Image (cartoon, rainbow, N blue to C red):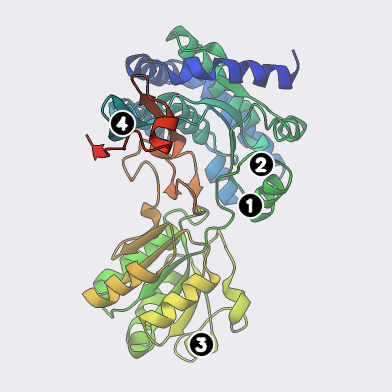
Amino acid sequence: MTLSETVHEMKLVSPRMAAAADADKNRALSAIAEALQKRKEEIFAANRQDLAEAAGKGVGEQIVKRLTFDEHKLRACVEGLQQLSALPDPVGRVTLKRRLDDGLVLKRVTSPIGVIGVIFEARPDAMVQIAGLCIKSGNCAILKGGREAEHTNAALFETILQAVTEASLPEKCLLRVSDHAEIDEVLRLDKDVDLIIPRGSNAFVRHIMENTKIPVMGHADGICHIYIDTADEGKVLPIVVDAKTQYPAACNAVETILVKREIAGRILPPLVQALRAAGVSVRGDAETAAIVPVDGDALAGEDYRHEYGDLIIACRIVADVDEAIEHINTYGSHHTDAILTDDDAAAERFFTLVDSAGVYRDCSTRFADGFRYGFGAEVGISTGKIHARGPVGLEGLTVYRYLMEGSGQCVRDYADGTKQFHFADL
């Protein structure tokens, strides 16, 4: 059977998947969690093979960190599956019920998207998270992980699929593809695939968008900012260090710090000292360089439109919250941006005017994550202005349908004035 035929069959079973009972979906999630633990040594062995091949290619430390699937990652996956099981069914929720006239009632009801193609980076735990989210939301999923994790992804997918079929969900609800030629073919299947979610570099996401008629949801960059409006070292230092160093390769790691001019002389020296102690290279504009030592040439303009994904951070001094907002909206990627302040008015202005999917006060940008939001996991981060923004959990994987129940009504009676609408929300 060709890939296009297989995906078409998936499209045909997607209504059955959409109609699956919540108890059956939860049973499948529990079965996956149990199977992962039972087969963990097999999965770890596959991961060691991927790590050995990556070492032979001399990949960087951050890629190795993403690629590793160990006891810690396994526990997080299992906990995420358990959290998903405990969440209410996102399918079949009535979000509007309106009487149009006597005996004519309209309902808006949440429903799965259908068939989703998810292309993700070499991070094996994403395989588990994405499959779990698609199952709980009643979607069928085509999964393509990074080639560096090929052996681990294969072992994980086999484990997941076996658990799902044993739990009586449609076997064809999940499909794994493994090479770029297959992805190129999937991108042409706009009659059978309802949504593509790519996770990766800016160039990769743009390639996907430019080579398919299928709607695409995702984000290209993670240029996150923290604007420092207070000189409170006890607040500022731990938050900025965490946002940069806890996982510098993540898309929600801070890339640029903006510092209010009137406090820069007080807060920058201890902040830069703390960042350097954590192994961070600090770059900055000429004004920053006049206060603290910086690495490299002075930054300006388009230099701030850069995602480092490493232990490197950019700094710029700004006049006030308004200049910080202007910088973020100009050079940011609309992902996640934070303000550290004791001023409620400044915080409210920042919340109102920063045009990002996530806007925070007095906390690390690293909280931008589906698991940390209580979604169980995330299928990706959306920075576009569509039905889902920020970490995309179950709600982001559903749309809605309108269901109407009548009792013999015809539009002509309302068009010619014989009958009148009597709208009322029920």
Side of 294 where 269 appears, left or right: left
| x and y percentages locating residue 398 in the rendered image | 44, 34
Neighbour tally class for label 1: few under 14, some 14-19, many 20 plus, Cα within 10 Å: some
Residue 289: image tag: 3
**How many angstroms separate mark 2 from mark 3 (CA)?**
38 Å
Q: What is the three-letter code of the residue carrying label 2?
A: Ala
**How many angstroms separate mark 3 from mark 1 (CA)?**
30 Å
What quarter of the picture does the N terminus occupy? top right
Residue 55: image tag: 2
Mark 1 residue element: loop
Q: Residue at x 57, y 78 (%)?
A: 295
State which tag comes first along the sequence, 1 or 4. Answer: 4
| x and y percentages locating residue 155 in the rendered image | 57, 21
**Label 1 with label 4: CB-CB less than 8 Å:** no
State which tag comes first along the sequence, 3 or 1. Answer: 1
**How many angstroms separate mark 1 from mark 2 (CA)?**
22 Å
Residue 212: image tag: none
Q: What is the three-letter code of the residue carrying label 1?
A: Ser
